Image (cartoon, rainbow, N blue to C red):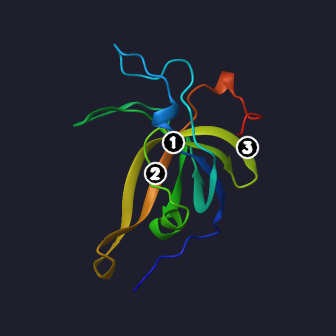
Amino acid sequence: MVQPNLIHPVPIKIQQLDVAETYYDDDYREPVQQAAHKNYAIVPGQIKWGSDDRLSATRGGAEEGADGYVLFRYVDLAKAGITLKLNDRMIQLGKLDTDVYIIRLQPMGHYSDMGGATLVKAYFADRQPARQRLGDMS
């Protein structure tokens, strides 16, 4: 069975959205104040920085630009017990403290002997650059 390798992987700290602990507005079905996140997990990933500031129109609607992406192997995510979802937070990319959120997921690296995708690109964006709380990494 073929498993693709990452090029120069670095440790990525991921905090998943904790839906059970987040208070939601009953009318709008969105988090009130700050969404709650679980404790972080560390998974190796391959980072690609690159700003894409444009808002593009697609068949599925407007798609916001990303600040870059992290390429993960599904086997590494499974070892850490993580299933990536939109709005999961990445608090550290390598040695760089960040506060970025996953805005799009793209399965990649499809191998027939693996039954499909072996990699996933997690596109990220900084939602509120002026309100960074880099010291709050719990």
Looking at the image, residue 18 lies above or below residue 43: above
Find out whether the residues at labels 1 and 2 contact each other: C-beta distance under 8 Å: yes
SS type, badge 2: loop
Judging by the rendered image, the residue that carries numbered circle 3 is 97
Q: At label 1, which amino acid type do we have?
A: Asp
Q: Mark 3 to mark 2: distance in Å? A: 20 Å
Q: Residue furthest front?
A: 20
Assess disc 1: are there few (<14), some (14-19) or many (≥20) residues with their C-alpha within 10 Å of its C-alpha: many
Query: Is residue 55 or residue 44 the one in the foreground?
Result: 44
SS type, badge 1: loop
Q: Residue at x 69, y 28 (%)?
A: 132
Looking at the image, residue 108 lies above or below residue 29: below
- Position of the N terminus, as image quadrant, is bottom left
Pinpoint residue 78: horizontal percent, then vertical percent.
48, 65
Q: Mark 1 to mark 3: distance in Å? A: 15 Å
Judging by the rendered image, the residue that carries numbered circle 1 is 88
Q: At label 2, which amino acid type do we have?
A: Leu
Looking at the image, residue 1 lies above or below residue 129: below
Assess disc 3: are there few (<14), some (14-19) or many (≥20) residues with their C-alpha within 10 Å of its C-alpha: some
Quick check: 76 left or right of 60? right
Q: Residue at x 38, y 63 (%)?
A: 108
> Which label lies toward us, 1 or 3?
1
Query: Is residue 17 or residue 129 the one in the foreground?
Result: 17
- Position of the C terminus, as image quadrant, is top right
Q: Residue at x 72, y 29 (%)?
A: 133
| Label located before the other in sequence (3 or 2) | 2
Pinpoint residue 134: horizontal percent, then vertical percent.
74, 34
Q: Mark 1 to mark 2: distance in Å? A: 7 Å
| Label located before the other in sequence (1 or 3) | 1
Assess disc 2: are there few (<14), some (14-19) or many (≥20) residues with their C-alpha within 10 Å of its C-alpha: some
Residue 84 numbered mark, or none: 2
